[in-house]
Image (tube, rainbow, N blue to C red):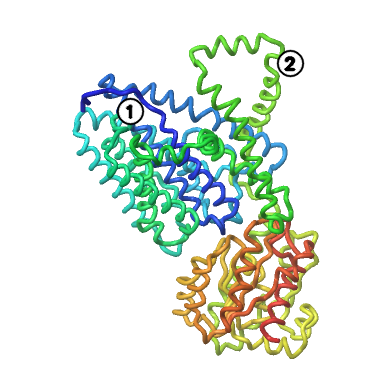
Amino acid sequence: MKEKTMKKSRYITGIDGLRSLAVVGVILYHLVPTTMRGGYLGVPIFFVISGYLITDLLRQEWQRTQTIDIKKFYYRRMKRLYPALVALLMGSSFYITLFQRNLLNNLRGVVVSSLLYLNNWWQIKQGFSYFDRFANESPFTHLWSLAVEGQNYLIWPILFYLLVRFVKKRSTIFYFLTGMGIFSAVLMAVLYQPGGDPTRVYYGTDTRLFSLWMGSALAFIWPSIHLKEKIPVQAKRLLNGVGLASLLVLILALFFFDDQSTFVYYGGLYLVSIVSTIAVAVTAHPGASLNRWLTNPVFTYIGKRSYGIYLYQFPVMIFYESKVTNLADHIWLHTLIEIVLIIGISELSYRFIEEPFRKFDYSQTWPTLHSWFSRPWISPKKPWQLPTAVIVVVALIGIMTAPKNQVDAEQKEFQAEIQQNKKIADKTKQQTTSSTTTTETVDSSTTSETVDSATKEEEEEVFSTNIPDIMKKYDLSKKLVEEAQVKELTIFGDSVALGTARNINEVFPKAVVDAQVGRQLYDSVPLLQKLADQGLLKDTVVIALGTNGPATSSQFDELMNYLGSNRTVYFMNVRVPTQRWQNDVNDLLTEKAKQYNNMHVIDWYDLSKKHDNWFRPDRVHPTVPGRIAYTRLLARTILK
């Protein structure tokens, strides 16, 4: 493993350009998901960069000393990563404890798993979904990737030492790491289940290591200090061409590589990692021009602060957007405000936390602490000490007292309502088209019952099989109610449709209701096929999706092509004023209605937008008046 010469380690400034590309992609993926569809690919770019730089430094240490100081490696990583992470956890816990107590649930588990770099597996165990944009409002969701890196930092220096000590040959090590990376990518493909939530394979360390180890493999055949600055013109042109091509591919992928494409998990992420590795290799080569092209004040600024920017993005978004009631109507204004807040907080973190603690001599910890506490609490030399102490104390109180998997009264009520409607929805699938006894929606021993006796604010909702009662309740003509009673249709939707299943069944007793909490449009076709196989996909279909996230034009076309031109398809548009995709979903539906003659839009948004009193506190799921209005709109549109 000995090299003929040893050069001084150099800082590759262009890497900051690649980091900037990665972090901007991730931020915009969360802020404008319909524009930056592939922004999540910033994570594998980060992984490749990390794998390369860490391994390159370990190789340099091995060449100098013929050993690896693993203890110092961990110490350096902790100094670099832990201070900002602890600041994030303490600051966010402080804010949650005082101002957003609905997020206290499971806070202790989040903090402990994050500090131990096990957050990805903790989230998997809890059943959290990275792709459920509506329900997953945790400010710590993104910490899964830090856990993957942290676990790699734990095992990699040990494995590195064993490889260079006993295998020795660089090419053999390169092939070994490449093979292990392929195994990881294959494991992702094997564990991925089309149509299901891909969070397990997206979060799993075993299914994401290929990006990190691809960067590590590169360091064995492309060591930064042994690359020649002076190379033939032809070689330089080749490197520049390949580098620019890889950069262009990455940029295009950030814009267009949708996270719900099955190709992402069947080799897509692996291919992006290969392209990222090529970009890192060309950037690291002093003979190519890509390093210089990626070096400028803006990229340098963002790149050096990319860790902080990544850390603080989610807390800023979650905390800010929880206080905004009209997010969907002013997307770009709020996006700009959030970007300014993220950059501002990251700058403060970089200046006053990351850099000071990175340079701090921890052997002087106790003398420094003694010096701090020997001074008055309020002192010009340490104006931050009192507020910091308050933040830490409040945060610790919140963390220690945080409930685990607690369900509050509002959530219990909603869950009970959903379960009640789920039973009704399941019964609709058991009926046959010839059945004449399915109009009864309540127990035969009663003619009325309340939706939930725990609901104090709402009037009791009475359900009936009597046509005059239905006419009065929904303000429908006798002709419409009689038509609805014999109308066969399939309602396919998410939690909004599920929460209204009982009302739908009251008006449309022959309707098949198939709805599920968290459902999104991208996984619709396999589920609709199951309904078709059971004979439950009728000639009239109502699709009520979009609450949990946007869809692409191609995903929509795939759905419509499956349903075919012989069915009449109605799409219920969405009211999600607190989420940035509301208008995107509704605009897409309006646009597609012009393209497909058999498609119609039911304008739930326009009817409900001025009626906050129709909804639960989330402003999305309807209460009794909202469910009645929802069902009335459905009936009047379909039966007009």
- Which badge, 1 or 2, comes first in the chain's sequence? 1
- Identify the residue shown where x is 36% and y is 36%: 284
> Residue 586: where, in percent of width, then height?
64, 68
Q: Amino acid at mark 1?
A: Leu
Image vertical order of residue 114 relative to residue 535, above or below: above
Q: In this view of the protein, which residue sits in the foreground, 597 or 442?
A: 597
Res 378 label: 2
Q: Nearer the viewer, mark 1 or mark 2?
A: 1
The answer for how far apart the CA atoms under marks 1 and 2 are is 44 Å
> Would you call the spot at circle 1 few (<14 residues within 10 Å), some (14-19), or many (20 or more)?
many
- Identify the residue shown where x is 70% and y is 24%: 387
Check whether the beta carbons of the residues at disc 1 and disc 2 lie within 8 A of each other: no
- Secondary structure, mark 1, is helix
> Residue 258: where, in percent of width, then height?
48, 59
- Secondary structure, mark 2, is loop
- Identify the residue shown where x is 29% and y is 32%: 228
Q: Amino acid at mark 2?
A: Ile
